[in-house]
Amino acid sequence: METARKQLRRDAIAAREALDDSARALRDAPLRAALAALIDELAPTVLGFCWPYRGEPDLRALVTRWLAAGTARRAALPVVDAATRTMRFRQWTRNSEMIPDRHGIPMPARGATLTPTHLLIPLNAFDALGYRLGYGAGYFDRCLAALDPAPVAIGVGYELGRVATTHPQAHDRPMDWLVTEAGIHPIAR
């Protein structure tokens, strides 16, 4: 099963990274519009999101606009502690000083530790049941299991990553919502 999951992950990432600028733009506009509508509907107070990596949708402008629309709103980026295999979230603004993590992904150099009420989680491969494949380290699954209350999990990605099944494992946590260029997909529980 793990071999199948690794292959799905590789294929989805390769397909996403192969998108040229025009193909990406055709996907990004409807994805961002759908995501903005969902965020407006759900009304988060602390929105966790990820810096774009390996061709993931870039949500920074959307989050910046969301922040500007309300003074009580906070945004946060993940900060991973590889030694403890845990993830926490540090406050982010468009003026935050950023430093690279061990993978070269920018993260805030400093800032308050926040607990997201809603979390935008990148999708590599994903299925209709809301299960996703990330990069294989399980950080988001452990984070969703540990936070109480758990944030609303919103998977964000391109339809090219949709698969029949991700072959979920017992520790995998499904998303509450999926948002792609095809629209908003609530996950029934």
Image (cartoon, rainbow, N blue to C red):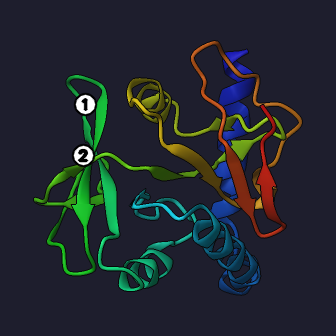
Amino acid at dot 2: Arg
Q: Are marks 2 and 1 in contact (CB under 8 Å)?
A: yes
Percent across and percent down for residue 132 are 66, 38
Q: Is residue 126 above or below residue 189?
A: below
Percent across and percent down for residue 127 are 80, 39
Task: Give residue 33's quadrant in the image.
Answer: bottom right
Q: Is residue 175 above or below residue 36?
A: above
Q: Quadrant of the C terminus?
A: top right
Q: Which residue is mark 2?
A: 102
User: Residue at left 60%, top 23%?
Assistant: 172
Q: Residues within 10 Å of mark 1 (few under 14, many from 20)?
A: few
Q: Secondary structure at mark 1?
A: loop
Does residue 75 appear to the left or right of 37 in the view shown? left
Amino acid at dot 1: Ala
Q: Nearer the viewer, residue 150 or 81?
A: 150
Residue 82, which numbered label? 1
Percent across and percent down for residue 161 are 76, 51
Front: mark 2 or 1: 1
